[in-house]
């Protein structure tokens, strides 16, 4: 798999105007090499693939990244720049500008300047060199993401079965996370969000030691990691009989999500996809209460390209996996968000998420 990804990366060199690429972003490093450790820098050129790391990982590189030539260095970054730049004189060496710190950039430019004048490489930014490839998932990635989604669904179902008035937000989050870990999750994609009552108006609220109250909504946003890949799922429930305001807002959000999942198609931009749900919410009179993008890509990172937002020019395509998560957030009252994780197949979205949604017909939580 790594060899195929290396070759895909090389096909981008001409477009990016580079002869080789330094990879310092840990997520892109893993995607290209298969390496799951925490330290190392790659340099991929047209004819070689180098992996520089320290002695903690020499054996691991051999096991996980056999397509790479190991470059042994003394520490996590000690001596890496001069060694990886050897033999690059007169070439354009790309770097991940969005992920290389200023201090790191200074280190690499010093190493380049220390080369003899006639053999200095030119360091050039190579924006989204790997991220653009990661947007479309391979079959094995879709399989891992599907398994993560289904485990997340199970964890959510468990949370919905045990939640009750008086339980704290933190206790519910712990129950969900405990279930996920006990049933095979490597970890959580992010700190589980449980926002009861007015806390639901804060999209990224973190669970607190405050009790959930009967007669209020609860927003639950959680995800798990399986084989390095993330899931992302949100459900909003109501503890007791939903009042008319909650029913109306929930129905608007569910309609926006349903229409987006039905109408988004390959070839659209992320901006166009976002607009489908945003228009439903705006037409209902709540446009000012939906302030974030409709969704985002999910993979080795919980938030990655493509984006579904008012500012996204990403072109949607088969093999991409994105969330569809419209919401309405009213300060002092609370919020409703419903989120599925979907895969683009044959030009249309298919939801991978199976966790139940609120049934307003019977007026109770799922």
Image: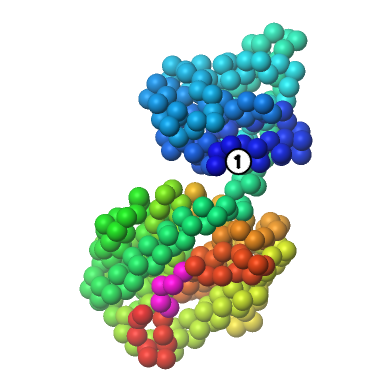
Q: Would you place residue 352 above or below residue 5 in this image?
A: below
Q: Residue at x 43, y 16 (%)?
A: 74
Q: Would you place residue 98 above or below residue 331 in this image?
A: above
Count of marks overlaid on the render: 1
Task: Name the outermost residue toward the top.
Answer: 116
Q: Would you place residue 77 above or below residue 297 in this image?
A: above
Question: Is residue 301 found left or right of 92 in the rendered image?
Answer: left
Q: Residue at x 38, y 77 (%)?
A: 237
Q: Residues within 10 Å of mark 1 (few under 14, many from 20)?
A: some
Q: In the rendered image, is residue 101 in sight? A: no
Provide the major secondary structure of the magenta segment.
Answer: loop
Q: Would you place residue 237 above or below residue 177 in this image?
A: below
What is the basis of the colouring in this image? rainbow
Residue nearest the observer in this picture, 223 or 5: 5
Q: In the rendered image, is residue 19 in sight? A: yes
Report the magenta residues as a range: 353-357
Q: Based on the displayed image, in which of its 4 quarters is residue 323 positioned?
A: bottom right
Q: Residue at x 39, y 67 (%)?
A: 153
Residue 106 location in percent, x, y? 59, 23
Identify the residue under disc 1: 5
Q: Quick one: quadrant of the C terminus?
A: bottom left
Question: Is residue 203 found left or right of 4 in the rendered image?
Answer: left
Q: Quick one: quadrant of the N terminus?
A: top right
Residue nearest the observer in this picture, 4 or 305: 4
Residue 256 location in percent, x, y? 58, 77
Residue 108 location in percent, x, y? 60, 22
**Magenta stretch: includes residue 355:** yes
**Magenta stretch: includes residue 186:** no
Residue 24 location in percent, x, y? 55, 32
Determine whether the residue tagged by mark 1 lies in a helix, strand or loop: helix
Question: Is residue 123 found left or right of 251 in the rendered image?
Answer: right
């Amino acid at each position: 798999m790594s060899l195929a990804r290396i070759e895909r990366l090389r096909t981008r060199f001409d477009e990016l105007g580079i002869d080789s690429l330094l990879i310092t972003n840990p997520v892109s490093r893993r995607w290209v090499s298969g390496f799951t450790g925490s330290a190392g820098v790659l340099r991929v050129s047209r004819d070689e693939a180098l992996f520089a790391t320290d002695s903690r990982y020499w054996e691991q590189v051999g096991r996980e990244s056999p397509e790479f030539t190991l470059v042994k260095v003394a520490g996590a970054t000690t001596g890496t720049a001069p060694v990886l730049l050897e033999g690059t004189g007169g070439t354009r060496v790309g770097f991940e500008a969005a992920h290389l710190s200023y201090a790191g950039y200074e280190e690499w430019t010093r190493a380049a300047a220390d080369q003899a004048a006639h053999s200095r490489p030119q360091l050039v930014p190579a924006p989204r060199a790997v991220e653009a490839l990661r947007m479309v998932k391979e079959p094995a990635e879709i399989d891992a993401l599907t398994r993560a989604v289904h485990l997340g669904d199970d964890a959510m179902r468990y949370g919905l079965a045990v939640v009750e008035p008086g339980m704290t937000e933190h206790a519910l989050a712990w129950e969900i996370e405990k279930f996920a870990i006990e049933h095979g999750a490597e970890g959580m994609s992010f700190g589980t969000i449980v926002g009861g009552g007015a806390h639901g108006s804060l999209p990224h609220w973190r669970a607190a030691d405050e009790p959930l109250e009967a007669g209020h909504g609860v927003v639950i946003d959680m995800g798990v990691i399986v084989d390095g890949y993330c899931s992302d799922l949100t459900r909003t429930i109501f503890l007791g009989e939903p009042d008319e305001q909650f029913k109306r807002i929930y129905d608007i959000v569910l309609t926006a999500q349903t229409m987006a999942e039905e109408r988004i198609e390959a070839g659209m931009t992320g901006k166009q996809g976002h607009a489908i749900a945003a228009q439903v919410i705006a037409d209902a009179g709540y446009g000012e209460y939906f302030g974030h993008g409709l969704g985002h890509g999910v993979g080795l990172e919980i938030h990655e390209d493509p984006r579904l937002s008012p500012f996204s020019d990403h072109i949607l395509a088969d093999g991409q996996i994105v969330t569809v998560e419209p919401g309405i957030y009213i300060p002092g009252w609370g919020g409703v968000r419903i989120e599925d994780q979907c895969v683009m197949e044959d030009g249309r979205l298919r939801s991978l998420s199976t966790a139940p949604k609120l049934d307003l017909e019977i007026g109770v939580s799922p």
